[in-house]
Amino acid sequence: MSKKEVKIIERLRSDEEYYGDLGRQYISNSDIQTLIEDPEQYGNKIEDNENFAKGRYMHQLILEPAKAKDFLIADVVRRDAKYKKFCEDNNVSFALKRSEADEIKEIVDWFMDENNPKTTSILEWITNFDAQYETPMIKKMHGLNFKGKADIITRDKDNSPVIIDIKSSRDVRKFMRNSPFYYYDSQAYIYQELFSMPMIFVVIGKEKKYSVRTKKNYYDVGVFTCSDQFIESGKAKVEKAVSEYNRLHGDNPTEDIESLIITGVL
């Protein structure tokens, strides 16, 4: 790795750089979905929304708790004029309401409880003394520059390096079936190529449940490793997205994107 690449990776630790002009010079997994499903939208800024904001807040509470203390939260009941003024005053297009932030905080407090038998082994990964958080990486793949940011780089029970990616889901039991729909297979392929280590998804349920046996509330938790078939599925998506990029956005595009129409046979 060159000195220039090392400097770029260090700059990409900042969210402002990662999602800003520097980061936009690299292909991310979210770009894979855009290039396949709506290639004309590639390069457009994705507007913030509730799911994105909740995901960021959960990640910060787990991985960067000091940073989470400054997370922007609107003390409003509904998204009305007061909420709109809050966003304008803080120069943002979206903010979590206090009730939404409290919901995420409750989930994370439960998840991070060291006495929680559901999460004991997972917390060992997360709190490992040499675990690294929010680690960026770049690499040229399939002729294009790619980027990714690993939630956690740690070691598994066999002391082998692994990437841990934290997700949340309304139904953890459907995560395996729904993963390709959300392009988690292409994410796993990209990240395993970037970091040269396997990826594990840790999935935290959003739905609060009650146990009659323990008389306590709980959330579902899932741990999912990636099969060769899952990785190959992701690779196929990346190759298709790269083809679309070269066809419409590359240095020598073969089609004019401004005259692009959707065609098919019914």
Image (spheres, helix red, strand yellow):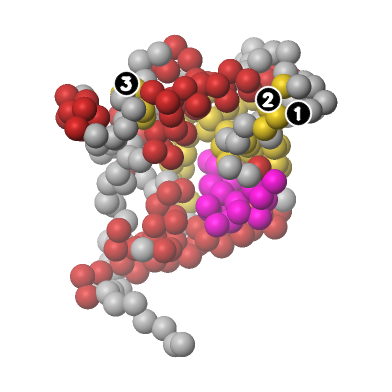
**Callout 3: 10 Å neighbours few (<14), some, many (20+)?**
some
Is residue 14 visible in the rendered image? The answer is no
Task: Report the amino acid beneath label 2.
Answer: Asn
Q: Are marks 3 and 1 in contact (CB under 8 Å)?
A: no
Judge whether residue 166 is colored magenta: no
Q: Which residue is mark 2?
A: 217
Q: Which residue is mark 1?
A: 211
Left/right placement of residue 237 relative to residue 172 reads left
Pick whichever, 16 or 53, lies toward us: 53
Residue at the (72%, 18%) spot, across then down: 116
Task: Report the amino acid beneath label 1.
Answer: Ser
Q: Position of residue 72 (x, y in %)?
A: 32, 22
Q: Which residue is mark 3?
A: 75
Pick whichever, 178 or 216, lies toward us: 216
The residue stretch that appears in magenta: 173-194
Sequence-wise, the earlier of marks 3 and 1 is: 3
